[in-house]
Amino acid sequence: MILLANSEAWPGFSKSVELLKAGRHGIDAMVAGISEVEREVKVRSVGFGGWPNMLGRMEFDAGVMDGTTREVGSVGAVPDTIPVAALAHEVMKRLPHVMLTGDGARRFATEIGFGVDETLYEDSKRVWWQRLEKELSPEELAKFPDIALAPLSRTITDPERVRDTTVFLSKDSLGGLNVVTSTSGWAWKYPGRLGDSPIPGAGFYADSRFGAAACTHTGEMTMRCGTARTIVLAMRLGHSLEQAIALAIDELRELKDGFLAGVVIHALDAKGNHKVVSLNCEEQIKYWFWDTDLPEPEHRFAEPFTS
Ligand code: GLY
């Protein structure tokens, strides 16, 4: 058994390990762990601790994929709901659809008994308003939110608050490879913006016969390249894990226009190898890893991409 997750996974990683050890399906184990991350206010990119959109409203994205059946559930731009990875799992289990967004996702949450959560953390509200005060003129602030938001969407981008996410990937006791993701998305995003975390093929993909991949940071790049699917398809076509990731990084580096910033790729192959590589990230990226040979989870360094 294996569990791989990004650094923000710390509040729930051990819980997922315990559930994998108890023989639970990988998605159940990882959704339980991610639910802890979503509740932890110290994780400033996921769940209650995350950042709101430009209007100061929280909108969450999440996805789950079963690599054995290749079933997917995902939710995007969901209001008033903290446990969105669990909601994405319910979409997979209960509906003929793969993805629900916005009010429809919230309606479904209510129908199946999810509570209506308080989602805007006081400190996030304070930082959001400070940011608006810095970017808007006094006249615009007086009219806010009845102003054009599009011009703001570039200037308000905040390098200190990257487009982070939590991603969990596992190989469970049945040998299945599965992925779960959750995020509040890009701080001060345009309302309705979806990142890559709910988009199968971009932010996550799993096929138990070949491998699994999930991305953090700039969804605007991985959505353009279909990064997670590229990696798994490359392994299907005979590439090693290293070669598959190198191909995905080449594709990301071919992008010359549009919004370009950091991306971190987390990937497993079906033999149990794993690799985490960061591209264009100034900070040193770490991740969590556990397998059945390790007594405790380890917090390891990702490999920065070097050309
Ligand atoms: N990767 C997270 C996002 O782009 O929202």
Image: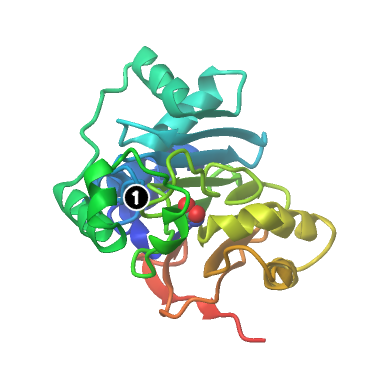
Q: Residue at 24% x, 30% y: name it.
A: 117
Q: Name the foreground residue: 24 vs 254.
A: 254
Where on the picture, by quarter, is residue 36? top left
Q: Residue at 64% x, 47% y: name it.
A: 206
Residue 223 shown left or right of residue 125 in the figure: right
What is the number of callouts on the image?
A: 1
Residue 211 shown left or right of residue 117 in the figure: right
For the C terminus, the image quarter is bottom right
**103 vs 185: above or below:** above
**187 vs 36: above or below:** below
- Residue 184, position in %: x, y? 38, 47
Where on the picture, by quarter, is residue 7? bottom left
- Residue 44, position in %: x, y? 29, 57
Q: Residue at 38% x, 60% y: name it.
A: 156
Q: Is mark 1 within 8 Å of ligand 1?
A: no
Q: Residue at 44% x, 29% y: name it.
A: 102
- Kind of element beneath mark 1: loop
- Of all residues shown, which one is farthest toward the top? 111
Residue under pointer 1: 46
- Of all residues shown, which one is farthest toward the right? 237
In the rendered image, is residue 1 in sight?
no
Q: Name the foreground residue: 240 vs 130.
A: 130
Amino acid type of the residue that numbered disc 1 sits on in the rendered structure: Val
Q: Name the foreground residue: 185 vs 298.
A: 185
- Residue 195, position in %: x, y? 52, 48
